[in-house]
């Protein structure tokens, strides 16, 4: 096992160190790939008169490029598509070279395609809008005022969505980001329908025969599907402390290790995703919710009897554990929630490092006993008594002692990126959430 891990190591030279930095992780690489493909098409089209003829800009091609990229941005976030991507990635057997499995396990960076498609699609749409305005200024209007108005509205809405999604703004005004993304996103979909049908009619095209009509139909269905499964369900809440609660669901839907579910108390305003904790042979699943903001604090202080759920159980980062023969999990606080289903399922040999304050007092004796029964050699680090550990150093030591092939870290953003970056610079595959949604 140690030899296999060594063979998968990446040389510790400066170029590799650059690309194991979270700033350049696969999420941004995928976004850059979308941009490069589109830039290549732009350059190729400039030399082949794709975008311009004697009559001015070729609006239909600009519109098609915008719609293709915006469709990619929407569809790649669809729950069934996400589950399909994880299913395909985890079909790779552990007998394959570690370097291939290392790369395949980065499947959860698919959000880079969402970001790339949204930004590039917005730029194509802006080019289309500029084209119709230029033609109108030249008294060569070839589209209706409705098409122009819908295009301007789309540019404004997409600019607002991209602006609030920028890292500093999103972090500081997360509720604004979420609501802008939801309500402006729905408005974008409606405006796209108006603009696309209006533009097709401007050109005298048959609406039902146009690819744009069917592409928009598919995008609309993908957005609508989770809301068709919206329901209010009863919950049971166990409150071991004022810092965390364990919530049990049993409404007919099953979860699986490495999955998550979104819940809400106000379905039109905000949704929060938590890792599902199914247990073998038991119905339903649990969630661990710890105090980490206004919403979670209110949930713990005033536990509801019902919450809203929508969509289906969706794959998350830890789903990729099956690509490796042995795994080290690093968790802090309520990050133990996403790890527990893997401990219970025993699909892969696991070594656990869990750093948290007063684990029994915070999460309850029953939960800690359940963890130790599933993983007797777990390293449970009580930060109240032992201080904060160097989790990256502990993970690297555990990989060598346990002969593991990979590390999966479930923690806050700063610690996750520290652990993932330092572990990968040691030539060991490492994974953790990237806060892209």
Image: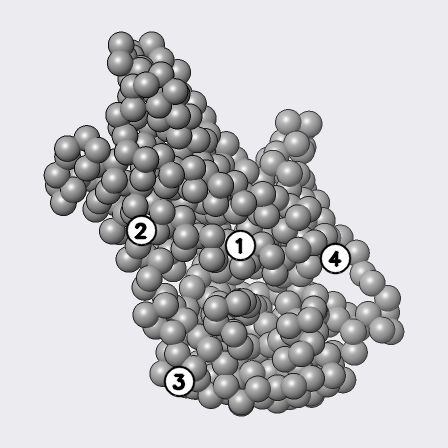
Q: Which residue is drawn at 26% across and 25% down?
A: 142
Please tell me which of labels 1 and 2 falls first in the chain.
Answer: 1
The numbered disc on residue 180 is: 1
Task: Tell me the SS state at disc 1.
Answer: helix
User: In whole angstroms, how far apart are the C-alphas of marks 1 and 2?
Assistant: 19 Å
Q: Position of residue 105 (x, y in %)?
A: 48, 49
Q: Position of residue 273 (x, y in %)?
A: 53, 67
Please tell me which of labels 2 and 3 falls first in the chain.
Answer: 2
> Badge 3 local density, few (<14 within 10 Å), some, or many (20+)?
some
State the residue position of label 3.
251
Depth order, front residue of 287/72: 72
Q: Which of marks 2 and 4 is in front?
A: 2
User: In whole angstroms, how far apart are the C-alphas of marks 4 and 1?
Assistant: 36 Å
The numbered disc on residue 289 is: none
User: In whole angstroms, how far apart are the C-alphas of marks 2 and 4?
Assistant: 42 Å
Depth order, front residue of 248/55: 55
Task: Tell me the SS state at disc 3.
Answer: loop
Whether residue 324 is visible, yes or no, is no
Q: Are marks 2 and 4 in contact (CB under 8 Å)?
A: no
Q: Residue 211 sits in which quadrant?
A: top left
Image position of 276 (left or right of 21)? left
The numbered disc on residue 219 is: 2
Q: Which residue is drawn at 28% across and 33% down?
A: 144
Please tell me which of labels 4 and 3 falls first in the chain.
Answer: 3
């Amino acid at each position: 096992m140690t030899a296999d891990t060594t063979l998968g190591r990446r040389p510790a030279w400066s170029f590799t160190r650059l690309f194991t930095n979270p700033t350049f992780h696969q999420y941004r690489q995928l976004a850059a790939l979308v941009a490069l493909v589109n830039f290549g098409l732009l350059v190729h089209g400039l030399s082949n008169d794709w975008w311009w003829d004697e009559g001015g800009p070729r609006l239909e091609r600009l519109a098609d490029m915008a719609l293709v990229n915006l469709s990619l941005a929407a569809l790649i976030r669809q729950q069934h598509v996400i589950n399909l991507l994880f299913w395909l990635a985890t079909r790779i057997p552990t007998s394959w070279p570690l370097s291939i499995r290392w790369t395949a396990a980065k499947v959860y960076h698919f959000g880079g395609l969402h970001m790339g498609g949204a930004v590039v699609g917005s730029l194509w749409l802006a080019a289309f809008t500029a084209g119709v305005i230029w033609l109108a200024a030249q008294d060569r209007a070839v589209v209706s005022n409705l098409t122009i108005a819908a295009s301007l509205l789309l540019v404004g809405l997409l600019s607002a969505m991209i602006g609030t999604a920028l890292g500093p703004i999103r972090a500081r005004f997360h509720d604004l980001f979420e609501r802008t993304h939801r309500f402006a996103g729905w408005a974008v979909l409606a405006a796209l329908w108006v603009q696309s049908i209006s533009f097709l009619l401007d050109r005298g095209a048959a609406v039902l025969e146009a690819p744009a009509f069917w592409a928009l139909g598919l995008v609309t269905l993908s957005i609508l599907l989770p809301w068709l499964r919206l329901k209010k369900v009863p919950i049971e809440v166990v409150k071991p402390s004022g810092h965390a609660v364990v919530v049990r669901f049993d409404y007919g839907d099953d979860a699986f290790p490495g999955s998550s579910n979104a819940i809400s108390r106000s379905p039109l305003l905000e949704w929060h995703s938590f890792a599902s904790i199914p247990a073998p042979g038991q119905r339903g699943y649990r969630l661990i919710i710890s105090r980490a903001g206004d919403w979670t604090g209110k949930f713990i202080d005033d536990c509801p009897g019902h919450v809203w759920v929508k969509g289906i159980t969706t794959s998350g980062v830890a789903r990729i554990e099956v690509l490796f023969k042995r795994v080290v999990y690093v968790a802090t606080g309520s990050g133990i929630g996403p790890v527990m289903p893997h401990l219970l399922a025993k699909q892969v040999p696991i070594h656990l490092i869990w750093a948290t304050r007063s684990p029994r007092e915070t999460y309850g004796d029953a939960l800690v006993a359940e963890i130790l029964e599933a993983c007797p050699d777990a390293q449970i680090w009580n930060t109240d008594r032992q201080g904060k550990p160097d989790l990256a150093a502990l993970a690297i030591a555990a990989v060598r002692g346990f002969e593991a092939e990979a590390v999966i870290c479930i923690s806050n953003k700063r610690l996750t990126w520290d652990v993932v970056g330092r572990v990968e610079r040691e030539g060991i595959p490492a994974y953790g959430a990237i806060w892209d949604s």
